[in-house]
Amino acid sequence: MRLTIACALAGLMVSATATLAEESNQVARGGTLYKEYCSLCHGVDGQRGEGFQTPIWGSKAHIKKFEHALGLFEYMLFLMPFDNPNKINEQQKWDIIAYMMANHGAMERTKTLEPSTANSVPIK
């Protein structure tokens, strides 16, 4: 019985470690920043929030109007976070965008979003 439980726990730990290893550092940082600065208005799941309830991804999202990651960055540069766009720096905004793009299915979670190629990462 103890061996079975130990094997099950070891399997869970390997699975959790594999999942974390499959996410780029940028996407992981973006997730942390998103929770701190974006989830109040956009929700933990990006579908809704307590503030403006503006979905970022999902069927009711307006994210497609930005066309690509660079368009989203340009918007965030001047308008997000809504209460003070200067609250987070440009690199943090790129991290959040990488997280958003990964959650929206526009890039793989293992990838890093580079500003120099952001205009070639379309929002689907």
Image (cartoon, rainbow, N blue to C red):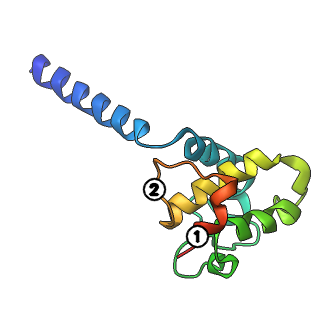
Seen at 41% across and 36% down, the residue is 21
Quadrant of the frame with the N terminus:
top left
State whether residue 15 is above or below residue 53: above
Residue bearing mark 2:
108
Asked if residue 73 lies left or right of residue 124, the reply is right
User: How many neighbours does mark 2 have within 10 angstroms: few (below 14), some (14-19), or many (20 or more)?
Assistant: some
- Front residue of this view, candidates 122 and 17: 122
Could one spot residue 26 in this view of the protein? Answer: yes
The three-letter amino acid code for the residue at tag 2 is Glu
Q: Which mark is residue 31?
A: none
Q: Comparing marks 1 and 2, which lies closer to the viewer?
A: 2
x%, y% of residue 101? 57, 62
Q: Is residue 123 left or right of residue 75?
A: left
Q: Residue at x 87, y 48 (%)?
A: 87
| Above or below for 54 versus 100 | below
Rendered residue at 19%/20% (across/down): 6
The front one of 84 and 96 is: 96
Taking the spot 43% from the left edge, 37% from the top edge, the residue there is 20
Counting from the top left corner in percent of width and height, residue 64 is at 62, 79
The amino acid type found where label 1 is placed reads Gln
Q: Say whether disc 1 or disc 2 marks the residue closer to the N-terminus.
A: 1
Give the secondary structure at mark 1.
loop
Viewer-proximal residue among 24 and 35: 24
Q: Is residue 50 visible?
A: no
The residue that disc 1 covers is: 47
Q: Quadrant of residue 47?
A: bottom right
> Judging from the image, what secondary structure is the residue with disc 2 in?
loop
Image x and y of residue 48, in percent: 63, 69
